[in-house]
Amino acid sequence: TALRWGQGGASGPGRTYEVTRELLFRAMGLVYFFSFLTIAYQFRPLFSSAGLDPVKLGAVKRPVPVFNFLLNNVFDLEDKEVDFVFEGCAWVGVLLSILLLVRPFTTIFLPIALWLIYLSHVNLGTWLLSYGWHWLTLEAGFLLIFLTPIMGWKSDTRIFPTSTFVIVLYRWLAFRLLFGAGQSKLGANASECWKALSCLTTHYFTNANPTFVGYFFHWMPDYVHYMEGAMTFLEQIYLPFFMFFPNRHVQHATGLLEIFFQCAIAISGNYAWINLLGVVPCIALFDDQFLTSFLPAWLWSRSLVLEPGSPGCREQRESDDGESSG
């Protein structure tokens, strides 16, 4: 499939999303990696049979397909031994997420397995996995399934081209996430400091786990904090609407601004993978022409077949030659 440089909306002439799909795979691999690693390390002291808040599988009302299958058809274990199934599945999730991140091969069974394992953990109903970002992880992971070919060693765009419809659904996910965050600051239960634009004057030393950068952010002048409050509303209330503006340059600028804000939040406080998850659907705002203009060829050369003489063709050939010589 040739990469042609075009304008227009999500499905405008010449717009392709093969590199976009590649980045979504790798970004979701990173999200799943941190998600499963958190479960693997914290499950035993918190939710095992000897933990602070033991999980009773018989009391779980939501579907936990992986655990039900393993415990009903594969293993016959005592209650204490069941803990190893829960924890073992989390470590399997860590391994599979690494495969999704490094992408040695492409198969739809990989994102399906990750989604089912994570769904089974979330539906156990533990307070550790009862927050909105866990369901957001499941939604983003579910969409990824429909971007994946059934089996292959690379993303063959001639057989399984990237679905523009799924790209738009990722954009819709980004819109809902960011616009919803802005709406929560204006609701009946919102803190009055948001309306006064003063929340950032205390935010940096009252957030979950402030970083050393947050210390310097906190001591900025008050007028800077008020400006930050205003920019927060611009970023979360107004900017998301430009995700659907029928111009690729506006969409690119919107994506870059949203990712910048997520990175700024991440360096000022440790929110685990939440901000990384906020970045993932924003990747769908970028097309191949934009991404190949600055990303290294080794990251995207297997996702595209470029026309001779087109931008990036030389870099792709050099990357392929390097792989062949290796």
Image (spheres, grey):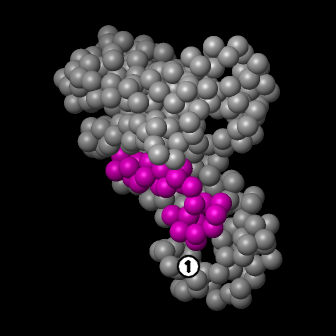
> Looking at the figure, which quarter contains the N terminus?
top left
For residue 166, side relative to residue 69 (left or right): left
For residue 165, side relative to residue 54 (left or right): left
Instruction: Report crowding for label 1: few under 14, some 14 to 19, many 20 or more residues within 10 A (C-alpha).
Output: few
Query: x, y (%) of residue 278?
Result: 51, 38
Characterize the magenta stretch by its predominant secondary structure. helix
Residue at horizontal 58 percent and vertical 83 percent from the top? 59
Residue 291: name its quadrant: top left
Q: Does the magenta stretch include residue 92?
A: no
Residue at horizontal 72 percent and vertical 76 percent from the top? 54
| Pick the front one: 314 or 115 | 115
- Identify whether 35 is placed above or below 22: below
Residue position for label 1: 60
Residue 245: name its quadrant: top left
Q: Which amino acid does label 1 sit on?
A: Val
Query: x, y (%) of residue 92?
Result: 63, 61
Q: Give the range drawn in magenta.
A: 119-148
For residue 28, side relative to residue 165 (left or right): right
For residue 265, side relative to residue 132 (left or right): right
Query: x, y (%) of residue 274?
Result: 58, 42
- Identify whether 95 is placed above or below 196: below
- Identify whether 40 is placed above or below 34: below
Residue at horizontal 63 percent and vertical 14 percent from the top? 224
Query: x, y (%) of residue 207?
Result: 70, 38
| Pick the front one: 96 or 43 | 43
| Pick the front one: 294 or 299 | 294
Q: What element carries label 1?
A: loop
| Pick the front one: 106 or 314 | 106
> Looking at the figure, which quarter contains the C terminus?
top right
Residue at horizontal 65 percent and vertical 60 percent from the top? 128
